[in-house]
Image (cartoon, rainbow, N blue to C red):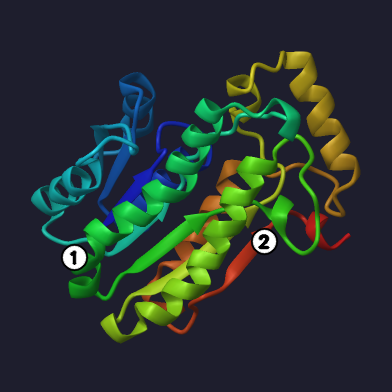
Amino acid sequence: MAVVTGGGTGIGRATARALAADGMRVLVVGRTPDTLAGTAAGHGDVRTLVADLTDDGVPERITAAALEAFGRLDVLVHNAAAVLPEPVGAVTREHARTQVETNLLAPVMLTRAALPALAAARGTVVAVGTAAVQGRRAFAGLSLYGATKTALDFLVRTWAVELAPLGVRAVGVAPGETDTCIGERMGWSPADIARHQAEAAARTPSGRVGRPEDVAWWITRLTRPEAVYASGTVVAVDGGASVA
């Protein structure tokens, strides 16, 4: 059974539904009741939990809720993220703390809390990063966000080694430009979003931006029992943009 953080919209919503369609019972976690309810609507195997991942005690509460609902925990998907664009000269401590705590510390603490249950199920941890930090690429204006996602990739590699004796795998998925509501959360207008996506599609070999379902497909495959030999890898799902 699975937990998906940031499950109210976008990749998190698509992943929760894809896992449910694959036979999993899923607990989606997020801060907004309405969007979580939208994820669960029409999907009887999807349950919701309203929580802020950065609050004290929340990792333990999420783990307890999953075990109470399902009796086990097979898959933990770290999808929740905060994106606050700022050049380094304008970075505020508040925004820096929000991104580090949400994107990096929350996955660490939730994995720690869930580890006994994951070990009992010989489960899988999935970290959703970004293809924008693959290789030697820069991420101008989003240095803190990019740094946290780079660190998440490193955690995947390290956890694959640390957790192997417990029978727990760690894998990552690095989406490229994907049609989610992230632009809206950053305050972009519909015109800004359309222009940005058109520019991204033009520099992507596949000729389009991704859909949340593109990423969810890979997450479901990487968490299936047949994928047991895959651990420590981060799969770029970006239409080839990171290697173009």
Kindly identify the amino acid type of the residue bearing the numbered disc 2. Ala
Kindly identify the amino acid type of the residue bearing the numbered disc 1. Ala
The answer to which of 46 and 195 lies nearer the viewer is 195
| Number of other residues with Cα within 10 Å of mark 2, as a class: few under 14, some 14 to 19, many 20 or more | many
Residue at numbered disc 1: 117
Residue at figure coordinates x 62%, y 20% from the top left: 184
Q: Picture coordinates of residue 4 (x, y %)?
A: 36, 47
| Residue 46 vertical position relative to residue 159 in the rendered view, above or below | above
Considering the numbered disc 2 on the image, is that residue within a helix, a strand or a loop?
strand
Q: What mark, if any, has residue 236 been given in the picture?
A: 2
What's the CA distance linking mark 1 and mark 2?
Answer: 28 Å
Q: Picture coordinates of residue 105 (x, y %)?
A: 41, 49
Q: Is residue 184 visible?
A: yes
Q: Is residue 190 left or right of residue 13?
A: right
The answer to which of 235 and 101 lies nearer the viewer is 101
First reached walking from the N terminus: tag 1 or tag 2: 1
Q: Answer whether labels 1 and 2 touch (C-beta < 8 Å).
A: no
The answer to which of 85 and 243 lies nearer the viewer is 85
Q: Is residue 18 visible?
A: no
Residue at figure coordinates x 72%, y 13% from the top left: 189
Residue at figure coordinates x 25%, y 35% from the top left: 48
Q: What mark, if any, has residue 224 been given in the picture?
A: none
| Residue 175 vertical position relative to residue 32 in the rendered view, above or below | below
Name the quarter where the N terminus is drawn: bottom left
